[in-house]
Image (cartoon, coloured by chain):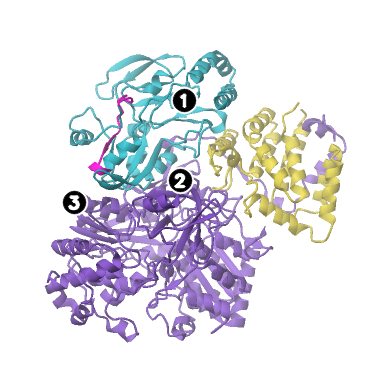
Chain colours: A yellow, B cyan, C purple
């Protein structure tokens, strides 16, 4: 792969990580949506693009429903946090944070010469894993990138994705997890 | 290990300290065994010949003299060397993936070589073993008497946290040890006519509590050897070894165990 | 869809170049948020032997405050253990203490401030920033104060994290309407009754380790666990102390007892009066102590003369012979007897009189200041810091509802819960429109949930600060996530060695963080920071006493010539020589003029409780060793140990009702209120026929508690009939009666 492809891949991982952050008008602006639109168009996901456009531009108050949905899916909710965005919730028997798989992800970061900035960061949060993939891509560590995807990210992501797809009430996160799925799936 | 039921208040600290120490998952394994190394069961209040009684069954691996779990292990035997920490004497033995240490008497598991077939867990009349299937890599697991902690000069996790000092850990072969004193006072093993494999955890208590414990918690029969599971594990072993060579043990192990437990349900 | 397109091929498509170029520029906040990673060389993760030990933890899985150390592997808290330096709990901690790890890493924990954009009780939460949350809390609370006065705010706090904000609301804002669960639904009655009798709150200061006899009224140690307290109890038993347990149920303590008094619930005071009357009549009380220190003894002995063994036997449904046996056993071992004051004592609405009786019995036996008796350890002196100035306390005093209504003169600090609820619902004598819950879950703590709901629904604003999404959080307009006891500086915990007759020592420990709270994936704050930020926004900045929890801790330690730094150096606990605790003498108000003047019986009096209606049994509840009220309901390890709370039913009754051990049932109470969930029956000879029992702290209705929701039955949901202790205004929660429902069929309970 060319260097520029790696850089592009890094940008894409960052874009996906950013997309999983809390919706805010600070970054969710026209630029953002036009990039997203381009992705969807390139992929030929026209129906998805359409439904997204509708839900975002239906009224001026498009942001709050997204924020409510993000909170419900990933933070705290009734009847329950739908899809905590942490790997070990899906990989350990008791569904708690910071299970053995989270420790292993952290060890992988360390092996690659990285550590999390916040002392209490839960290592396998989806944005951390995507940011980490971006760093690997940026450094051209394609093998490590594939290994991380295979050993750490993909074992839980489809379960998380399924919960979001099944329980989501806003098209945005459904489209987004499918997009993440596309960019992290094993190469054919 | 002695458990003094006169002192035990049934607080469950031992069970949870163990879970924390060894990161034991909660719930049940795929063969419906409770995932735990250490448990507390409340007994009664029930009538006994000595009056109304209520006590506890704090259970763990008995590190038996004739462990049923060791003989059923289908893993290939390898030669292992054991050392007596006191005399420094050594002994070589052919062992499968689980064995009884000839010197300290504990029953241990080699997680590297364990096939995760669950035959040992099925063989234990005390249900002291389960299969830990975390991350699709099944391994038998049970109480080790915290040999790793003991080697570091610490008490077993359950003993350390016990506020009642109801768990006494020591050397039964030393006649002056506190545990031996308890044996002299009449601490008993949970054994029955059909289950006599020399358990090394003993219970001490008053008559009515001991009556309640022994009548409710002594296994009355050895588990039916799950021949099919053992045979299939043995048959599949070459394939698993091959898988291991390919660095795919986790995957292969999961597939095989899943296949087996589905078989059971038929 | 481009099915055969893989991600890397996708990258080569031309039109993407523009998109990716735009990407790097499209995030306004990227510049400051940047990447969550920093460069760091790899170090291998350690085994248990390689963990780092963090010192200075003080447990808050319950409120006994055992001292902890944390075992930390690569930033992850792996295990909590008792601090080996502790002269209190030692290296031991209980099941809940051990399970603190799972609280820390519970995915249901509150992570960010949230605003409810849905309905109260059926929330739709939206994550907001701390600034937004604090601005709104301050504006809304100030709005209530401006419109209705400071007393328009009610606060329901619990636990050490609520102490600082409580001081703010009481002293600076100036509201008297504070209902602490630990007083009004727990031990306030005990404290006030002992103050009226012995002029001191008792805590659980009986020297059980050195007692020759121990009397427990409902105490069920083992099911109820506070480490050093249970150590004292067990040491006493080991040394041969006789144990008397008065309980309608064969509890964990009854199972170790020499005498089990299978008492009819609610009649304990009658039992105590008969014991005391027998001691006086037979001259077997401590005459010397009573003569020297007794007040109103003649009035007292005349006032309880009616309490014969036979009268009590009939009232309490126990043999007269057994009551006599208890009295004689206590007399034979006096003064070295532990008459346990109890802890949770808000039972029947006649509880002040029972607690007075216990204090009187203690005095009658001269069991004060002697080995085995009522003895307080002599703890070390430490400083105080973080106290708010009393700006508006006079206003609070003047608006205290119980004082305005001339009710409940022996109320513990704060205001009786029901007066607050009634005022809020009726608007009389004044409106209460702002509500703050801090660490308390009034939904499961306070009887009559419908009344609580009514109070909450009429509020202008509700703010809740907690760690977990407990039931009350569903009612919050703004919900604030607090750092847990493992992540913050907090209170000072002083004390003495657990066995009062041991080597005399004192200790000073402080709650210090075992793990960091700094993270990008959640933002939790400590109570000093939160309260100060609200105070600033309410224009009350100048009254702020400390800037941080750390400063508060350090200042308090300075009062003992210590510092955080020094305490860490000493392994988290400072130990120094102590003083002999024995020899103190207390005056005993056998007859209390103060109580009589307030219009209540000055001599301890048995006030009968409502009889059990036909077909029902009285619902009695207690503790499970793996739960602390409802605070631990979502803990994966604890729930796994005891997933449900079986309801105890007498075996003979069960047979007549056709119920078997393990049958799944629901409960329905005298008001027709059905349990929201089901549980199983525990059939046992170890309970009276007129009583059923279950452990408290199960059956949360908040589905956000994904582990605990719907597991077992919430006893509080069935406590719809309230009793209020007239002297103190605290609740009585054992005057409710239930029937069983199996497969939709209501089953009467035979008498």
Report the span colored magenta.
B193-208
Residue C330 drawn in magenta: no
- Residue that label 1 marks: B111
x, y percentage for residue C457? 61, 71
Q: Are marks 1 and 3 in contact (CB under 8 Å)?
A: no
Q: Nearer the viewer, residue A18 or C437?
A: C437
Residue at 65 percent across and 29 percent down: it is A147
| Rendered image: mark on residue C662 | 2
Q: Secondary structure at mark 2?
A: loop
Q: Are marks 2 and 1 in contact (CB under 8 Å)?
A: no
Our reading of the magenta stretch's main secondary structure is: loop
Rendered position, C386 above or below B76: below
**Label 3 environment density (alpha carbons within 10 Å; few <14, some 14–19, many ≥20):** few
Image quarter of the N terminus of chain A: top right
Q: Nearer the viewer, mark 2 or mark 1?
A: 2
Left or right of A6? Residue B72 is: left
- Hey, which quadrant is residue A64 in on the image? bottom right
x, y percentage for residue C298? 18, 81
Rendered position, C578 above or below B1: below
Residue at 34 percent across and 40 percent down: it is B57
Residue at 26 percent across and 54 percent down: it is C233
- Residue that label 3 marks: C239
Q: Secondary structure at mark 3?
A: loop
x, y percentage for residue C399? 49, 83
- What separation in Å lies between label 1 and label 3 (alpha carbons)? 45 Å
């Amino acid at each position: 792969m060319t260097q520029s492809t790696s850089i592009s891949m890094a940008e894409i991982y960052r874009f996906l990580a950013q997309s999983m952050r809390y919706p805010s008008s600070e970054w969710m602006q026209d630029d953002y949506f036009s990039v997203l639109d381009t992705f969807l168009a390139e992929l030929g996901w026209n129906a998805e693009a359409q439904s997204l456009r509708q839900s975002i531009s239906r009224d001026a108050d498009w942001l709050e429903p997204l924020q409510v949905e993000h909170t419900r899916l990933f933070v705290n909710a009734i009847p329950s946090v739908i899809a905590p965005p942490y790997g070990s919730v899906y990989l350990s028997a008791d569904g708690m944070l910071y299970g053995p798989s989270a420790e292993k992800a952290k060890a992988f970061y360390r092996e690659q010469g990285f550590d999390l900035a916040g002392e209490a960061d839960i290592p396998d949060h989806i944005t951390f894993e995507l940011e980490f993939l971006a760093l690997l891509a940026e450094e051209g560590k394609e093998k490590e990138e594939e290994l991380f995807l295979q050993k750490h990210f993909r074992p839980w992501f489809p379960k998380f994705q399924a919960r979001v797809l099944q329980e989501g009430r806003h098209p945005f996160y459904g489209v987004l997890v499918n997009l993440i799925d596309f960019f992290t799936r094993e190469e054919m | 290990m002695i458990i003094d039921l006169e002192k035990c208040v049934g607080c469950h600290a031992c069970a949870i300290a163990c879970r924390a120490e060894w990161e034991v998952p909660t719930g049940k394994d795929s063969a419906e065994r409770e995932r735990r190394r250490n448990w507390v069961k409340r007994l009664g209040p029930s009538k006994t010949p000595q009056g109304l009684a209520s006590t506890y069954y704090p259970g763990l691996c008995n590190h038996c003299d004739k462990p049923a779990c060791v003989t059923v292990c289908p893993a290939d035997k390898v030669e292992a060397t054991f050392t007596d920490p006191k005399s420094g004497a050594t002994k070589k033995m052919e062992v499968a993936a689980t064995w009884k240490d000839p010197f300290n008497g504990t029953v241990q598991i080699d997680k590297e070589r364990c096939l995760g077939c669950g035959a040992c867990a099925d063989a234990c009349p005390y249900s002291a073993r389960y299969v830990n299937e975390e991350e699709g890599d099944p391994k038998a697991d049970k109480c080790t008497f915290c040999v790793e902690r003991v080697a570091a000069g610490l008490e077993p996790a359950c003993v350390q946290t016990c506020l009642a000092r109801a768990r006494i850990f020591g050397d039964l072969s030393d006649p002056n040890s506190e545990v031996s004193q308890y044996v002299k006072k009449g601490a008993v093993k949970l054994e029955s006519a059909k289950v006599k494999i020399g358990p090394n955890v003993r219970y001490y208590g008053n008559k009515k509590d001991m009556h309640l414990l022994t009548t409710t918690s002594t296994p009355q029969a050895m588990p039916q050897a799950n021949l099919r599971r053992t045979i299939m594990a043995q048959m599949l072993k070459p394939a698993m070894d091959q898988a291991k060579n390919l660095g795919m043990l986790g995957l292969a192990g999961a597939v095989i165990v899943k296949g087996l437990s589905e078989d059971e349900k038929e | 869809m481009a099915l055969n397109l893989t991600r890397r091929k996708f990258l080569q498509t031309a039109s993407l170049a523009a998109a990716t170029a735009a990407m790097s520029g499209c995030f306004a906040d990227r510049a400051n948020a940047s990447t969550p990673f920093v460069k760091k060389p790899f170090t291998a993760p350690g085994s248990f032997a390689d963990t780092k030990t963090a010192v200075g933890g003080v447990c808050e899985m319950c409120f006994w405050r055992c001292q902890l150390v944390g075992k930390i592997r690569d930033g992850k808290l792996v295990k909590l253990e008792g601090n080996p330096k502790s002269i209190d709990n030692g290296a031991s901690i209980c099941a809940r203490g051990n399970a603190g790890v799972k609280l820390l890493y519970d995915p249901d924990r509150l992570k960010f401030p949230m605003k409810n954009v849905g309905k109260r009780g059926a929330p739709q939460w939206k994550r907001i920033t701390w600034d937004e949350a604090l601005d709104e809390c301050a504006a809304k609370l100030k709005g209530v104060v401006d419109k209705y006065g400071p007393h328009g705010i009610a606060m329901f706090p619990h636990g050490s994290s609520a102490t600082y904000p409580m001081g703010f609301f009481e002293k600076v804002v100036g509201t008297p309407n504070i209902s602490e669960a630990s007083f009004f639904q727990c031990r306030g009655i005990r404290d006030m009754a002992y103050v009226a009798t012995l002029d001191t709150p008792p805590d659980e200061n009986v020297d059980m380790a050195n007692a020759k006899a121990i009397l427990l009224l409902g105490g069920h140690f083992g099911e109820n666990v506070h480490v050093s307290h249970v150590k004292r109890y067990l040491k006493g038993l080991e040394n041969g102390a006789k144990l008397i347990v008065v309980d309608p149920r064969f509890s964990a303590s009854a199972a170790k007892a020499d005498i089990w008094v299978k008492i009819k619930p609610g009649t304990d005071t009658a039992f105590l009066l008969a014991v005391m009357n027998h001691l006086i009549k037979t001259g077997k009380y401590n005459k010397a102590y009573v003569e020297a220190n007794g007040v109103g003894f003649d009035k007292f002995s005349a006032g309880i003369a009616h309490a014969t063994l036979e009268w009590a036997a009939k009232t309490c449904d126990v043999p007269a012979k057994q009551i006599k046996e208890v009295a004689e056993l206590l007399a034979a071992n006096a003064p070295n007897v532990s008459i346990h004051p109890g802890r949770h004592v808000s039972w029947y609405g006649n509880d002040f009189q029972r607690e007075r009786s216990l204090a009187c019995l203690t005095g009658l036996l001269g069991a004060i200041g002697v080995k085995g008796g009522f003895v307080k350890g002599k703890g070390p002196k430490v400083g105080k810091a973080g106290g708010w100035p009393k700006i508006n306390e006079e206003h609070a005093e003047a608006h205290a509802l119980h004082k305005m209504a001339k009710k409940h003169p022996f109320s513990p600090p704060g205001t009786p819960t029901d007066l607050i609820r009634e005022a809020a619902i009726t608007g009389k004598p004044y409106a209460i429109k702002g509500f703050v819950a801090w660490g308390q879950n009034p939904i499961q703590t306070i009887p009559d949930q419908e009344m609580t709901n009514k109070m909450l629904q009429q509020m202008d604003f509700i703010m809740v600060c907690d760690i977990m999404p407990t039931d009350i959080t569903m009612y919050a307009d703004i919900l604030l996530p607090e750092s847990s006891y493992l992540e913050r500086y907090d209170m000072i915990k002083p004390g003495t060695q657990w066995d009062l007759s041991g080597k005399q020592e004192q200790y000073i420990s402080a709650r210090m963080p075992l793990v960091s709270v700094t993270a990008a994936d959640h933002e939790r704050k400590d109570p000093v920071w939160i309260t100060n930020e609200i105070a600033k926004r309410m224009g009350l900045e100048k009254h702020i006493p400390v800037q941080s929890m750390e400063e508060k801790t350090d200042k308090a330690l300075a009062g003992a010539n210590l510092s955080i730094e020094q305490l860490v150096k000493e392994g988290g606990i400072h130990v120094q020589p102590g003083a002999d605790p024995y020899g103190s003498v207390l005056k005993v108000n056998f007859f209390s003029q103060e109580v009589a003047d307030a219009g209540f019986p000055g001599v301890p009096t048995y006030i009968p409780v409502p009889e059990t209606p036909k077909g029902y049994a009285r619902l009695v509840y207690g503790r499970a060793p793996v739960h602390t009220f409802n605070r631990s309901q979502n803990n994966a390890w604890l729930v796994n140990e005891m997933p449900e709370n079986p309801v105890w039913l007498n075996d003979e009754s069960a047979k007549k009702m056709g119920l078997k051990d393990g049958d799944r049932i629901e409960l329905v109470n005298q008001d027709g209120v059905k349990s929201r969930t089901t549980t199983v029956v525990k059939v046992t000879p170890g309970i009276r026929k007129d009583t059923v029992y279950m452990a408290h702290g199960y059956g949360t209705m908040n589905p956000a508690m994904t582990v605990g929701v719907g597991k077992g039955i919430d006893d509080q949901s069935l406590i719809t009939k309230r009793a209020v202790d007239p002297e103190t205004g605290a609740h009585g929660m054992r005057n409710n009666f239930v029937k069983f429902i199996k497969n939709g069929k209501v089953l009467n309970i035979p008498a």
